[in-house]
Structures are given as C-alpha cells and as structure tokens.
Amino acid sequence: MATDTAVSKTPQISFEEFCRKTFDPKGEFAKPEALKGIRVLSCTQYILGPSCASYLAELGAEVIKIEAPRRGEAMRHTTPFNEPFLYPLSKYVPERGTGLGFLGANPNEYFCSIDFHRPEGQNLVKKLAAKSDVFVENYRPGTFDRWGIGYRQLSAINPRLVYQWLGGFGGWGPGRVRASYDILGQSQGGNFGMTGKPEFMGGSPAKHTIWLADYWGGMMGAVQVLASLYYRDKISGEGNFIEYSQVHGVTRQLEYALPLYGRHGITRERWGTWDTQLCVHGIIKCGKSSYPNSDNPQESEEGYILISASGDEDFARLCKTVGDGNIASKYAKADARVKAEAQLEIYPFLEKWAADKTKEDVANILDKANILNQPVWNAKEVATNPHWQQRGAVRWLDDPYYGDLLHQGPGYKMSQTPPRLKWAMKPVGADNESILGKLAGLTPEDIKRLEDQECI
Ligand SMILES: CC(C)(COP(=O)(O)OP(=O)(O)OC[C@H]1O[C@@H](n2cnc3c(N)ncnc32)[C@H](O)[C@@H]1OP(=O)(O)O)[C@@H](O)C(=O)NCCC(=O)NCCS
C-alpha cells in the first residue's frame, strides 16, 4: 500500500528536467542564502586564505577583506595584464591595476584597508572582530598575535569568534618557522614526489599550473569553519581556534602512499600521465592538431586524449577497435596490464594508432565503441562548451567595477540555498566608508583623516 502511494506520487517529469528546473542559475538570486547573517573578516593574502573566505562568501556570508592600505595584498601584484583602466587597483595608485591572479579567489567580498602595525588600525580590527563570527588569516605563525590582534586577544573580546589560521606548517613543531606557498606545500607534503614523468621518460617532478593545494586547502578551511559554527551554535556557545597546515593538508590527500610505505617499505613514485593501479587509464598523444592554423603554439601542437578502459571487457573492446589481437590476448587480465613493462608496450601502441588522428577523431571512434574517453581541453574549449554555459559553471558577469567578465561560477548547486557569484573583486579599500562607518562607527571625517594618514 505504502509502495503504491509512493509510486503514485512519483513526479511525471524526468530527473533531468527536475534538476534543470531546481538548479536553474537564473533563479539563484530569488532564493535565500545559507550563510546570510554570518560575518567573516578576511585578513588574507595570496590564495590559501582568500579562497577559504570566498567559499563562505559564495554561500552568502558577509565577507570583509582587509588589506594593506593603497597597494593591497601581494596577489594583486603577481601577474601581468593588470591594466589600470580595466582592473583598477585603488584610487590612491591610479597608475597600477590589479593582476589577474587576484581573480577567482576573492569574489562576493567587501574590501577595506587597515594598517595592522598601527594602534589605531589594531583598534579598528578589534571593533570589527567584536561584531564578527569568523576571522580568517594566513600569515606566518604568531604574526597577528605579535600585532595584538591574534586569537588570544580577539577571543577575549569576542569569545564566540571562530578564528581560522591557515599557515604553512602549524604553530608548533620542529618544522614550523619558515615561509610557505602552495608550491612549497606540495613539495614538502609529498605530492610533487609522485607527480610528473619518471626520469627514464625524460621527466621530472611536476607542479600544477593552478594553485591546487591552496584552493583545496581553502575548501578544507571552510569546512572547519562551518563545523566550528555548528558546534558553537548547537553545543558550546563558544568560538574555536583552527590551525590549518598547508603541508599537512597536502599529506592528507596522498591516498595510499603512506600505508604502502608503512607496511611494504615501497615509496610511491612518478608515473606521468598513466596510472599505477589501472591500465588503460591515462593520457595519450594524438598525432594531429585540432587547430593546425592557430596562432597559439600550444594549440597548433598535437592533441591529447584521456582513455579509460581498465576493465578486461573494455580493454578487449579497445583492442578490437584499434585492431590488435596480440596485445589483447597478451594483456587480457588487469593484473598483467597494470605492470610497468605492460604499460610501456600498451600506451605506445595506442599512440601509434592515434598518430594520424586528431583528439576529436579518436573520441569519435571510441565513443562508437562505448569506451570512456575525453579529449584534453584548454580554457577556451571549456568556456565555449554548452554544458558549462547552460549550467552557469562558466558565465558572463556584469561586474560593477570591472565590466563584462567571463568567470567561473560555483562548482556545485543547492536547491534551497544556491551559492552564487555577485561580483568578482573590488579595488583596495572600496568599502572603507560603508563598512568602517557601519561597524566601527567612523564618520566621513574620520575616514578621510585615516586615509590621508595611510592607516586605512
Ligand atoms: C605568504 C607568506 C610566505 C608571506 O610572508 P611575508 O611576506 O614575510 O609576510 P608575513 O606573513 O610574515 O606577514 C607580515 C608582513 O605582512 C605585511 N602586511 C601585509 N598586510 C598588512 C597590513 N594590512 N598591515 C600591515 N602589514 C601588512 C607586512 O609587511 C608585515 O611585515 P612585518 O612582519 O614586518 O610587520 C607567509 O605569510 C606564510 O608563510 N603564510 C602561510 C602560508 C600561506 O598562506 N602562503 C600563501 C599561500 S600560497
């Protein structure tokens, strides 16, 4: 009976249609925000701390970013293409723009500037922290403590404050006193030791082009903040001091490398664009370029495609498609295929087959044979793809400061409280007047004096 009722209530539209309607990006702004009412001070720089705060801003928190007066934080000065007329830096430095590296890590935030060295600046931070839920910073160990605005001082003013410090190595232990960046985190945390081609293939440890450990560290940091808010509001009534370590955060993602070493003494090593557990499960080169006439040298070179046919049946079908019976029978079983010597035979054989094809040619053939594949796409191929466009994963933003901007949207959707993209970034101190007026009680005259003194 219960089953009958459930069946009779099953909606008539397909699951796809249901998802399309429920998650339509056009409806985002008509729905509530999950973190509305949560205020976050983001005293952050580069990517690790900023991305943590911006993931909260994406969910509706009021995030107030505080930077050094006039020039702002270092990330604004790290990339070219920072034309002042396109990406203004601050009204005090009209000849400079904000570097593009700043984009993506600070959307939806309000921008204030305060000099943390000055007593008047430190007082402002205390006033803001008294009215905030979360404080995020990613400076060297104890820097904010030294300035008198660290966890120990601010929690005395606001015991409900959740203080998230994202650092390189943590606040204690023998390896703590160094500067850290994403590249150092990945290098020391163990990731680069197993990324890149082995030496006999002409390879070396490889870094990612994107600041992967910073963005995932920021995301982990946001999870810890949310857990702390939950615990504060449901259980303790008190804040939390969180210490996220960039190098340990990388080690947390090392999969089975540590158990492998611990039990068997085997060090996991580099295996390039292939896979140590599955074969075929890697990237091969296709001999022909998809864009032979492109002005971009990396586009006019040969294409690449990912092929995944690691199950025995899939591998047999792949060999049939490629037209080889020898390899198919020699490596019919997954255990035989996954060995290094086998892979050294199988991948070159696939590349030989793909030598007169573009990545799209290969994809067409493999699609027809029902073999999982994916041409390796660049940013242009992603940006122009309808799947990304329709779902708002890539979207045009009419940014109040920077005009039309093609920007990534949130990577997930929520039916009741969708995350959203409001603006990409603002110049240094753009919200000084409104935020410092509202939360620290500064008058327009105070603002002018402090701006003239470069305290804000
Ligand atoms: C990123 C990092 C290497 C930068 O190191 P750094 O430039 O030496 O800066 P610190 O963290 O020591 O911060 C102190 C400096 O910040 C500067 N600063 C930045 N914003 C400021 C502000 N609003 N007001 C005053 N000083 C400010 C000052 O120059 C200050 O110098 P001081 O120590 O003489 O007072 C370091 O902060 C770090 O290791 N952070 C943790 C890991 C991390 O997040 N890395 C970046 C992401 S990849």
Image: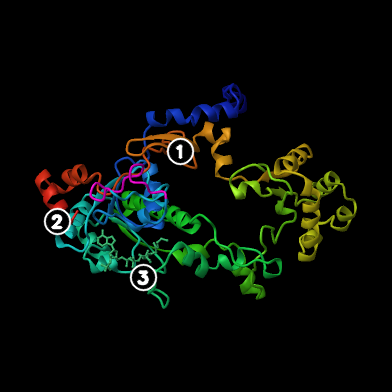
Label 1 is placed on what type of residue? Leu
Tell me the mark number nearer the camera, choosing from 1 and 3.
1
Q: Which residue is mark 2?
A: 453
Tell me the magenta residue range.
81-94
Q: Secondary structure at mark 1?
A: strand
For residue 253, which quarter of the picture?
A: bottom right
Q: Residues within 10 Å of mark 2 (few under 14, many from 20)?
A: few
For residue 340, which quarter of the picture?
A: bottom right
Q: Which residue is mark 3?
A: 171
Tell me the mark number nearer the camera, choosing from 3 and 2.
2
Mark 1 or mark 3: whose residue is earlier in sequence: 3
Label 2 is placed on what type of residue? Gln
Q: Which mark is residue 406?
A: 1
Label 3 is placed on what type of residue? Gly
Colour style of the rendered protein structure: rainbow
Q: Residue at x 38, y 40 (%)?
A: 34
Residue 304 within the segment the image draws in magenta:
no
**Seen in the image, is 402 located left or right of residue 434?**
right
**Seen in the image, is 163 located left or right of residue 392?**
left
**Seen in the image, is 118 located left or right of residue 322?**
left
Q: Secondary structure at mark 3?
A: loop
Residue 339 in view: yes
- x and y percentages locating residue 307 in the rendered image: 72, 49
Q: Secondary structure at mark 2?
A: loop
Instruction: Determine the CA span between mark 1 and mark 3.
Output: 39 Å
